[in-house]
Image (spheres, coloured by chain):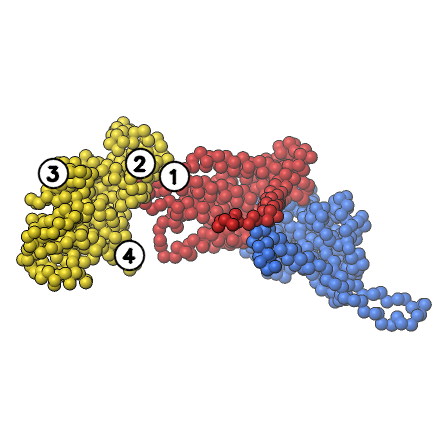
Amino acid sequence: MKSLLRLLWRRVPALPAAVALAIALSLLASACADDVAAPEAPTPGTSTADPTAVPTPEPLSGDITVFAASSLIQAFEEIAVAFKAENEATRVNFNFAGSQDLRTQLELGAQADLFAAADTRQIDLAAESGVVVDDHEIFAHNRLVVIVPKANEAVITTLQDLAEPGIKVVLANVGVPVGAYSRQFLIKASDDPAFGPDYGANVLANVVSEESNVRQVAARIQLDEADAGIVFSSDVTTELAAAVTTIEIPDALNVLADYPIVLTTEAEDIDIAEAFIEFVLSDAGQAILVEHNFIGID
Amino acid sequence: MLEVSIRKSLGEFTLDATLDSPGGTLVVIGPSGAGKSMLLRAITGVLRPDAGRITLNGRNLFAGDRRLDLPANERRIGYVPQDFALFPHLTVAGNIGFGLRLLSRSDRAARVAEMLALTGLESQRNLRPAQLSGGQKQRVALARALAVRPELLLLDEPFSAVDAPTRQTLIEDVHRLLATTGTPAVLVTHDRNEAMRLADRLAVLISGRIRQIGDPSEVFSAPVDEEVAQFVGVEIIVPGVVRALEQGVALTEVAGHTIEGGSNVAPGDRVLVCLRPEDIVITPATGGAAPTSARNHIAATVARITPWGPFRRVELHAGFPLVALITRHAEEDLNLAPGTPVTATFKATAVHLVPR
Amino acid sequence: MSATEAPARRPNVFAAAEVCAAVFACLVVFLFLCLPVFAIFERAAETDFFDTISSSTVTEALRLSLLTTTISLTLVVIFGTPVAYILARVPFPGRDIADTLVDLPIVLPPAVGGLGLLMAFGRRGIFGEWLDDAGIEIAFTTTAVVMAQTFVASPFFIRAAKAGFEAVPQNLEDVARTLGSSRSSAFFRVAIPVAAPSLMAGAVMAWARALGEFGATIMFAGSFPGRTQTVPLAIYRQLETGVEAPLALSAVLVVISFVVLLTFRLLMRRAAFTL
């Protein structure tokens, strides 16, 4: 018998490969298998059948995947920690990227439960493609600021300086929410006599790179590779603030960015997803957002 | 006129060679690993010795003490390596003309044509090396080296990469080419037959040192030490002239004696008669020898007897140098001593003739 | 009974199994390699292909990619050939380290390469600072694209060229020298022609790598249409707005690459010889 096996092993070259493949596949499958949910513990205090008592909801357990805009990285990670503190048997997995990239990924078949974008345009497009449901909630606002490197060798002190020839400006590309917002700001400024009608065109002429998400814009300035960039005020974290100087954009010229969050059509754990949205909208969630320089909803 | 005296160490091996050649063909013979290729590469200039001197026709090519090292492309020394090293991306004509870049196009074409004719390669002129036989490649390599009229030609084991039948023809071709072009040469080989055929002067290189240098027959018949002797084979090599051919067996006159043996020669041929001492039987010089099948009986006198391991090497005067190898026992039994008259007997089948 | 009997015949089932396994493996590989390419063309055919091709996004990206990869390849070959030769022929102390350094960009993720280039040649870079003082700025320019491509592509050429030169028997160059060639003349007239197939293969690989370069480019040169947005960057950017432009770009790139590779292969066969 052994010699027959040996013969088989040597004579059929696919056999060792097939065995290896089978092992590999089963390992892969086991790695991907969902964690077995912990058995639900019986909730205390329901043994007496009191018809007037409101039944305590069973604790949530399971995983959700949240696609969120890059500007939300720190805020949402902190929210997730707080959410898990309240719902111990849950886990929130994130995918952070530019909102437009996330929408594209969803359209190409990626699985997620929630989508939180930096503008409503991406959510609308996603709804049109049928990857998210129609109802979304605005959970935060944001506004634009201009950042320049601390060294500021280009000596940019006012917004008008951005139009000076030779300045290197970095924006997100127009498909990214903050990139679209930045151009809205430029259009508004060009209507303002304090800037002049050529302002927008001149600034755009100074753009040396168009990034795919707001954090890349911030990185360019942080590394002093460019003279100025436009990001969200929430992006000026303590770490970034150490490397850049912020130039405020007055409200009249600024854009109030709307941050929507929405269920995807492929959401699996709807209960947890809706609980997450609720948490984000709750006082606790809003407090965290404001702490990270977002503007809360009223 | 070539004078070489160099030292070069490479790892554990040291080449320490001194030789000279007045012209003609110097054959350096030695076992593999003796440093023969290293020697040639040093003379060409692609390998720099650690110390010493190389002079060619009065020109210093290398002088270690004066930090003189003429680059290989200025030495005017041709080189034919063991694997021929033909340029695979050029045709035969392209290979031959490679060194002729400084000539005008017409001069170059003329010279290439000349070399093609000389080596009999006209019909192969547009072939690539990959399409040539071993013998043809050898001739291209020679033609290429000789095209630039070098002052010296170096050949590294030129016949080892060729099959046996082609070898004989090639040896003759090389001999003829060198003679026709009048190019002095240094040829390195481990084959004694090639050495005998081509050498005007013979040097023995063993373990990196030149043990002996001189006339070929001298080196072969009077090896200077045991290692040289073991390599060249203790052989008797004497020049002679074929007088007649009887029933296919040659009769050769050597220093007044007639030696019977050998074939494939014609009367009038100049030959070298080769014998092995092991084949020489010494019999006491008493008259009336019993009839034997051995055809050759040479009267001789014992000149010297030297120990040779368990044997005795007996050198004999016979008008030409003869050496016999006998046991100690035999020496005692025959009462041999210098001056003892003896008869050297050997069979015709022990005789080997090499055309000269 | 005869002394020599025919050996027992092998069971046929094993031979058949071998053939099946081999065929199966071939099918899997070819499908896996060809299906994505075929799919691109199939989907591209469904779009307004020719309109998209003539759009400025596509033509600018193509023009930029072809321009930069040509320059990068030229630089790689001009500087890489002598380096490869030295690595192959000249034993110098630390050659192993030099060898490894040359190979490094292959192993490094392109983003790391990009970051490194930024740290070295960016405005605040080690070398870049001096350049900046002299008024020369490299980041965000087409020059940066060329540098990123050259950085990632050179090991591919140098490795192949080095192997090619190592395969040239030293004897050939030695003989060339005895025939009157100087060292550099022997290099050009013997070493390069004999190593040519390897050099060309290396050049093709380097060009292909440069063409596909993304990570180092986007980090060091940024992404700006017409100036630094090469085809891979354009595909990535355009994917945000739809699949048409990416499909068109991809299809054109596949065609160009195929034509170039085929041309090289045919050229090499004509110039081929055996040593």
Tell me which chain the residue with mark 4 is part of. B
**Going by the picture, which residue comes out furthest to the right?**
A51
**Is the C-beta separation of discs 3 and 4 under 8 Å?**
no
For the residue labelled by badge 3, is the local secondary structure a helix, a strand or a loop? strand
Towards the viewer: A139 or C14 = C14
Q: Are marks 2 and 3 in contact (CB under 8 Å)?
A: no
Q: Nearer the viewer, mark 2 or mark 4?
A: 2
Q: Earlier in the sequence, mark 2 or mark 4?
A: 4
- Structural distance between the alpha carbons of marks 2 and 1: 23 Å
Name the chain under label 1: C
**Quadrant of residue B272 within the rendered picture:** top left
The nearer-to-camera label among 2 and 1 is: 2
Residue B243's label in the rendered image is 3
Residue type, mark 3 in image: Arg
Chain ID for red: C
Which chain shows up in blue? Answer: A
Q: Which chain is yellow?
A: B
Helix, strand or loop status at disc 4: strand
Q: Are marks 3 and 1 in contact (CB under 8 Å)?
A: no
Cα separation between marks 2 and 3 = 37 Å
* Residue wearing tag 4: B10
Can residue B331 be seen here?
Answer: yes
The residues tagged by marks 2 and 4 sit, at their Cα atoms, a distance apart of 34 Å
Q: Residue at x 32, y 39 (%)?
A: B134
Amino acid, disc 2:
Gln
Q: Which residue is mark 1?
A: C193
Find residue B312 and report its horizontal and vertical position in percent.
15, 60
